[in-house]
Amino acid sequence: MVDLQAPDMRATISDVAGRAGVSTATVSRVINETGPVAESTADRVWRAISELNYAPHSGARELAGGRSSTLGLILTSAGGYFAGEVLAGIEAGAGDAYDLLIYAAQKGPAERQAFYLPLNEHNTGGLIVTAGSLPDEALVELSERSLPLVLLFQSSPNGLALPSVSFENEAGVHRIVEHLIAVHGYREIAFLSGPPQLEDAGARLRGYRQALADHNIEFDEKLVAQGGYNAAMAETAVSRWLDNGILPRAIVAADDESAMGTLSALHAARVRVPHDVAVVGFDDAPLSRHLSPPLTTVRAPIEAAGEMAARLLRDLIESGTADLQTKLPTEVVVRQSCGCE
Amino acid sequence: MVDLQAPDMRATISDVAGRAGVSTATVSRVINETGPVAESTADRVWRAISELNYAPHSGARELAGGRSSTLGLILTSAGGYFAGEVLAGIEAGAGDAYDLLIYAAQKGPAERQAFYLPLNEHNTGGLIVTAGSLPDEALVELSERSLPLVLLFQSSPNGLALPSVSFENEAGVHRIVEHLIAVHGYREIAFLSGPPQLEDAGARLRGYRQALADHNIEFDEKLVAQGGYNAAMAETAVSRWLDNGILPRAIVAADDESAMGTLSALHAARVRVPHDVAVVGFDDAPLSRHLSPPLTTVRAPIEAAGEMAARLLRDLIESGTADLQTKLPTEVVVRQSCGCE
DNA sequence: ATGAAAGCGCTAACAA
DNA sequence: TTGTTAGCGCTTTCAT
């Protein structure tokens, strides 16, 4: 057990000023390098600061200054297996001039959520909102409060015109399905979809259907199941197919995580991949090349998306304007699970 | 391109008061449910709030109120593949009364870092600091400013007495190595260590050495390489072993990610797992049971650790006291990569 | 049940 | 180069 020493004789700027024998204005100038200060004075101030363990009160700063040099990020607590990548990208895009504050939204979109959001126009220069983390109404409210907003993996809801960053989901799936058809000659191709409420999940499904249509393959509802961007759910879905005697020649998973679940279900049933059935995914998660067989998938530049979002947000903050829709290109990464090589 | 509407006629509490025909004090009472307000008055106030799109200024609130109902989390931008799990745990432990603000520390621990930290005693009730995200000096400084601090996956640095949460790393590795020795009779067991600067990496290595010693197996330096908690690095290390004609009977990876890299290197070299060499990991990442063969590993209750850290921090904030060291138990999860079944 | 007014810690004119 | 001072938006006694 530790006992916390009696708190709260926390130093303020005037304590520092007093100890250094200057005015608070001078201390402020020293800290912010705003306006001229004699070097000797600055030294005394810094010394006082460290002797008193002084730290500026960011709230007071925002209040007085009206600025904010931090970008906010809102994501769902789940985050997914690429939360880290997104983060790294955003950080790169934010640059040195901005700090990053993240709020992990609770599951249930509560009432008045936007009102109580701990990240807002007062402590943040703008917000990057990832798909599924905030209800549309909150977005509307936030944007009515004229908070710069950028959407990630989701496009602007109806009636709003918010810059957004996402992938060429439809084209990516289309291309990989086409690979399955054209290169390998498969025609019985199943699809494991993502959560229906997610926009990119819809796009990926559309890409699948379009590719079939383009090659005169009839769409078969029985060959589509919910994979939920989730290994366990995908595993169940594939097992169910197997139990029902359904064995497509190829399975397209809407993301790599569900591709993983697919692989597991297939292994468990002693179905050989890609010999008996081919499997492909989407995202190119860092681990995907380590699966066995190494997964053929669509590479989505996740880190680049984060970086782009941050860049757009900065544009929006600094110049009041930013590109509305940016779709990052995706690319098929051929490995072995499709039957190649 | 969007153009942001002219910003900043952002409503303040007195705008709301004016529109509702009450004083700012009353508005404050309504929002915070502090003190009696006539129901009809409250209605008018809420209406004014939504008409004006008013949102309270959190900085001003902290300033005036001196409270803070948010917990801070500091992590490295990498985050690792379990950032999401940690987050979910912390959120659960934080409960409804606290919000969570996260700061992803930049790579380079800069000078005066603690001074400029965007999460501090003024906007946060306390901080959870994950291993490797802040240098010890920053920890010292922060704790001298009497900010409640809890360490995650790292124990208190010398001279400080901060509550910390970590795993029984040493015992976990000890047990899994023992499994390899006692159940399978392997004696030529290699180890892929984690980043040396991380405390838990050291503990895991110690567990390995101790288990060997306990079974009279001589420690062989050539059978230890740096896996860096990282698939690519592990892959390289294992390939190098193979190239040098080193083929242990089993490989213990310090975490699941390096186990994954190990598997890849082995597959590439057509070495059969577990037939030719067994592989085990540590963490039990969600994906580990989907590898092929499914990975035998040590389960570390990552989410529980996050929850515990949040709980400790709340204790510290609310009662000024908290348990100093908590080590969460780990458990061997037997699957197939060790040769079982 | 409500209002007036004094700060909270800081920044930014404006003076000197 | 430095100090004075007026707020920034909010909470909180203290009156009423």
Image (spheres, coloured by chain):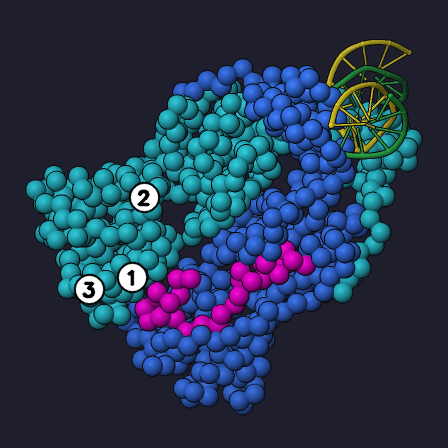
Chain colours: A cyan, B blue, C yellow, D green
The percent position of residue B294, horizontal first and vertical second, equals: 35, 70
Please tell me which residue lies in front, B147 or A290: B147
Find residue A196 and name its label.
2
Give, as a three-letter code, the residue at label 3. Leu
At horizontal 24% and vertical 52% (from top left) the residue drawn is A225
Q: CA distance from mark 1 to mark 2?
A: 17 Å
Chain identifier of the residue bearing label 2 in the image: A
Residue underneath mark 3:
A242
At horizontal 90% and vertical 36% (from top left) the residue drawn is A19
Write down the quadrant of residue B63 in the picture.
top right
The percent position of residue B231, horizontal first and vertical second, equals: 42, 61
Give, as a three-letter code, the residue at label 1. Thr
Q: Could you tell me if residue B34 is visible in this image?
A: yes
Can you say whether B1 is above or below B145 in the image? above
Query: Which range of residues does the magenta coloring cover?
Result: B286-312
Please tell me which residue lies in front, A205 or A259: A205
Chain identifier of the residue bearing label 3 in the image: A
Tell me which numbered mark, 3 or 1, is placed earlier along the sequence.
Answer: 1
Crowd around label 3: few <14 · some 14–19 · many ≥20 (10 Å): some
Can you say whether A117 is above or below B170 in the image? above
Give, as a three-letter code, the residue at label 2. Pro
Judging from the image, what secondary structure is the residue with disc 1 in? Answer: helix
Tell me which numbered mark, 1 or 2, is placed earlier along the sequence.
Answer: 2
